[in-house]
Structures are given as C-alpha cells and as structure tokens.
Image (cartoon, rainbow, N blue to C red):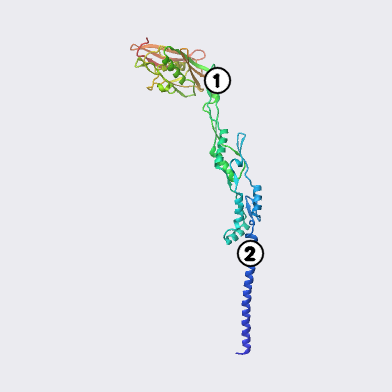
Amino acid sequence: MSKKVQKKKDRLKNLKENQKRNAIIGAILAIFILGIMINYFNTNYIYNDKISKNMFVENLDVSDMTKEEALKVVNSNKNPKSIYLVYEDVKHEISPEDIDLTYNTKETIEEAYNYTKTDSYFENVKRYFDVKKNSKDIKIKSSYNEVKLSEYIQKVSKDINVEMVNAKVYVSGGIGYNPSVTGKDLDIASTKESIISNIKDKKYGEIQLKVNLKEPEVTTEDVQSVNALLGQYTTKFSTGAPSRTHNIRTAAQKSSNVLLMPGEEYSYNNLTGMRTRSNGYKDAPVIINGKLEDALGGGVCQVSTTLYNSVLSSGMKLTSITNHSLASNYVPLGRDAMVNDGGTDFKFKNPYSHPVFIKNSVGNGTVTSSIYGNAGDKPNLNIYVETFKVNGLDAANTYRIYKDSNGNVIEREHVDRSVYKKPRK
C-alpha cells in the first residue's frame, strides 16, 4: 500500500473519531442545557411555593400567589352571610353562627396549591399545560350543623304555625260568635331544602317560605248568618225524681250547642252516646215493652221529644222519627220522639243554605230546645195533629202546614203516623 493511500485512510479515521467525540460532547451539552431548562421550569413553575397560573377559587384569581396570600384574598371576599326566611313581611334571620356555617377555604387553597404538585411529575407537567389553556376554578365547600338548622326551622315554625279554628255560635242572653281562624303550617321539608340549596350555591338574602293554609270548614261569615230563632219548644218534668232529672240534664247538655251546616244530618244518639254509667247516666223510669221500668237513661226521651217539637216548628227535614209505645204525658199525641240504644234514633237534616244552631237548656223543672238560623229561612207554618183510633188504640197523623205571606196554604206535609199500644192514663 502506498504511503499516500495510508495517509488518506488515517485522515478519514481521525475525522470519524472527531465527529463521534463532537457528537458525544454535543449530546452531553444538550442534556446539560435540557437539565438546566427543566430545573428552571420545575423551580419556577411547578415546585415553587406558589399556586400555578390560571388557577381560580370561586372565580377569584389566585394565580402565582402563595398559600398565605391566596387565603387572605379568598377570606376577604368569600364569607358566609345571613339567610333571611320571609313570610308576610316578617323576616327570620339565620346567621352563620346560628348553624355553625363555615367555608373550607384553607382546604380549598391547599387543593389549588397542590393541583400541579402531585406525586407524579408527568401528571404535574400535564396539568400545568392543561391549566394554561383552560383555567381551573375550584369550588369552596360549606359545612353546617344540621341539628341546629332543624332546631332553628322548628323555632320559626312555632312563630308561623296557627291552628285552624272553626267559627262557633254561642247563645247567652243573645246570639254571639267566635270567629274562624285560617290554619297555617310551615312546610318544614321545603324550607330546609331551600336553605340547604342556598348554602350550597352560596346564595344569601331572602327565602320566601312555603306555608300551607288550612281553611276553616265553618267560617265567620257562616256563623254570622245565624241571626234569628227559627223554632223553640219547652216541656216540663218533676224535679222530685233526681235520677231522671240528672239524665235529662245530661242528655240535654250532650245534644246541645251543635252547629248543623247545610245538608248535614243531626243524630241524637251519636251525640248523647250509649246510656251507660260510664257516659254519666243513672237508673230512672223508662218505657220498656209498653211498661214503665227503672233502667239506665230514663228521661233522655223527654229531651229528644222536646227537640223534635223544636225541629217541627223550625222546618228541619225529618229523617228518622219513632213514637213511644205509651203516650207521653208531657206532650200531645203525635208529638213525641222515642230513642233507645237498640238502634232507634232521632235524626233530622238542615234543609237550608245557611247553618242552624241547636241549643238545649234545663232549669226549674223545664227543658227547652231552641233552633237558631237565618231570619230569611224562618218558615211560616203551623203544626197540625189529627188523632184517631186504630183497633181501639190511640193514633195520630202529624202534619206541617206551610203558608205564604198572605196566609194561604202552599204545602201540607205529612210528618209521621203514630200508634200507641196503650192509651194515655
């Protein structure tokens, strides 16, 4: 091989070695520079003591802030406030202290700070560049004492709730009225749900409360229409029989002070109850199988009979009426109403468009039944009883004769047919 060729080969070899050495030096230099850049990036943008760029807490920019700086900014702008529960221009304030309402601002700042400082470096880098494109907004969480919240709502409900009261009529020297009251009931579930929703959404201010109303079944207007006496009847009894007097008084009280709305039915037995000692009745003479015998409740039929005659004159609609087997000595034939625990009841309905009020009173050996109603409903009628015999037994047909304002008969109503097993003594 010539020396010329050998020199050429040596030069090529040296060139390759230099290129290889330069490549290694270049790679080392590039790695060094990259390391410097990564270190700079890590130190200035990730592993520093500041929150990443483009980070927000409830729309507050906390980018490039230390945790202390961010906490100061958030606490000065985001604080729990009072909520006001409003009903009929009355406000009930719930302060944060009332329910221990707080924000987790410290934990929220920690979350913002650590968003690009997880255990994974590659996750941190990914998050850093993601948040540069799309900002990150972290929500503050609220906490409160649910027991205290429930107790506060209960307290508010006591201020709002009103028990529904039906209007009433009373008679004491005249006709008087107790007005009706519309019931109010705070919807506790709805109220609590609204408060919790506002706390979650950090909406403060007023919440209009939902209150359920319960309208009275009997209004003040209803009872004020009762303004006149429609019918009244009085019977006498001997006060020399204390047990019977007691039963009359007891039955009269139990069946009195009843407001009967239009179309409603009055049941004497339902009001007076079973004739038992536990219901306040005593043994006294009563008609059993056509004979007078001592039994519990003797005397209650005198009250039903007295009421029957008041019902007749007031124009009430009779729905159940039965005469005694023996004619009574305190009313004429055809004017008595027998009741017993065996199912025989005295019933009538209110046929008018206004309520009527039934009032019984006992005193000085008399029992009086009065029916009050609207003056416009007062009927113009007479009661007529036609007596006759059926197989030798006393009998009677009872009628109501209705007349117009000129006294002309407009209706003849047959009310009842009575047959008595034994004649009156």
**Alpha-carbon span between mark 2 and mark 1:** 95 Å
Of residues 149 and 311, the one drawn nearer to the viewer in this rendering: 149
Q: Which quadrant would the C terminus be assigned to in this image?
A: top left
One can see residue 265 in this view: yes
Q: Is residue 215 above or below residue 257?
A: below
Name the amino acid type tagged 1.
Gly
Checking the image for residue 39, the label placed there is 2
| Circle 2: residue type | Asn
Instruction: Find disc 1 in the rendering and name its residue.
Output: 176
- First-in-chain label (2 vs 1): 2
The N terminus sits in image quarter? bottom right
Horizontal and vertical percent position of residue 220 = 55, 25
Q: Is residue 37 above or below residue 17?
A: above
- The percent position of residue 185, horizontal first and vertical second, equals 54, 34
For residue 170, side relative to residue 267 (left or right): right
Q: Relative to the observer, which residue lies in front, 327 or 209?
A: 209
Residue 224 visible in the current orientation: no
